[in-house]
Amino acid sequence: MRVAIVHYWLVGMRGGEKVVEALARMYPDADIFTHVVVPEAMSDGIRSHRIRTSFIAKLPRASRLYKSYLPLMPLALEQLDLRGYDLILSSESGPAKGIVPPEGAVHVCYCHSPMRYIWNMYHDYRGSAGRLARFAMPLVTHYLRTWDESSAARVDHFVANSSTVASRIRRYYRREASIIHPPVAVEDFAPVPEAERGDYHLMVGELVRYKRPDIAVAAFNAMRRPLVVIGGGEMLGELKALAGPTVRVLGSQPFDQLQHHYARCRGLIFPGEEDFGIVPVEAMASGRPVVAYGRGGATETVVDGRTGVFFETQSVEALIDAVDRLDRLALDPAAIVAHAQRFNGTRFEEQMSAAIAMACAGAGISLGAEAARGSGGPLFP
């Protein structure tokens, strides 16, 4: 079969791009379509494929200002010529699924989330936007919602990265989705002996408002306990100004430093609501427990009382209580690591193979026993 992989933009190796990398590994002859690509920011696995861009890539400073061209992306997607492809795999959380599939092709959408800025987090994004964007957003997002909902009909089968996202697909698109958690490179992380661990907690991730890093900094300021914050983003300067003497905001760090801090922290602080959340799994693969807000994808990866603890409101007081509760627990690092291993890449590829085979079988196309072998567990909630 000729396979096309469609992704919204390829400008860095985050969770969505890790999924693209896994799909590209599953289909080594696939072509990749996207709005804009920064080749030097991509892994060798993605760069080894032929990558085609939409007309967005030809617009001024597209590699930096791509999000400004969001209103044009539906039109750009529909100009992509996918004739001759038998299987289309779209990776969606920005506009990606809205291609026009050729007759006879099967379209499977792996959905990280329906676009947050027009659906579940619309008011958050509008509230933090500048005056001009705040004025324009109602008109632009109304048009995008209409297109996004209608383009869901072009998908033969949805796969959600979590139960949280499956419920959004059901609400906004009126479609059911199988659930396959994304791949996590758990083999890249490992625990260290207790004697090598530090006395600090850790927060990792992009420093943006919806992830609520301000709660973590304020809580550890109040407790006067050590916290290390790793990540870049729009709140970096603000958090450095907010940080007290026990809080170190390091900004973005190389991967070896991330591995070092994961393995040596007392626990990971995860105060935002995520669609899935790879960071908690990476911390658990390092043998460290997680203190997480009890909403969203973290509830599907962290086991309360066994691999971490939850707090129920996004407040300084609730986070402090959760850290105190974690201190009173004696959790087994080996059991935490074993739990994290469930989210490995092999499991993802096996389950995706089964989901794709199911979608193709529904269209009367057989992929053969090897492609349909999927032994990674149940696909549906």
Image (tube, rainbow, N blue to C red):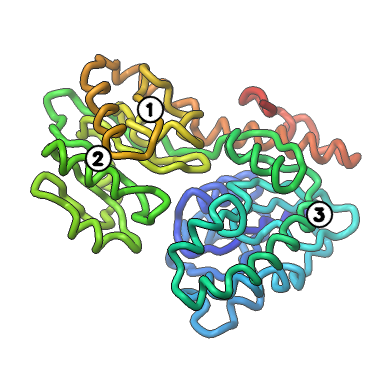
Residue drawn at x 48%, y 69% is 38
> SS for tag 3?
helix
Residue behind mark 3: 154
Nearer to us: label 1 or label 3:
1
Q: Earlier in the sequence, mark 2 or mark 3?
A: 3
Residue drawn at x 70%, y 48% is 172
In the rendered view, does 129 fall on the left or right side of 256? right
Nearer to us: label 1 or label 2:
1
Q: Earlier in the sequence, mark 1 or mark 3?
A: 3
Between 256 and 326, which is closer to the camera in this rendering? 326
Pointer 1 with pointer 2, Cβ within 8 A: no
Label number found at residue 202: 2
Residue 333: percent from left, percent from top:
29, 20
Report the Cα–Cα distance between label 2 and label 3.
42 Å
Residue 155: percent from left, percent from top:
78, 50
Amino acid type, mark 1: Phe
Relative to 33, say whether 303 is above or below: above
> SS for tag 1?
strand
Residue behind mark 1: 310
Q: Earlier in the sequence, mark 1 or mark 2?
A: 2
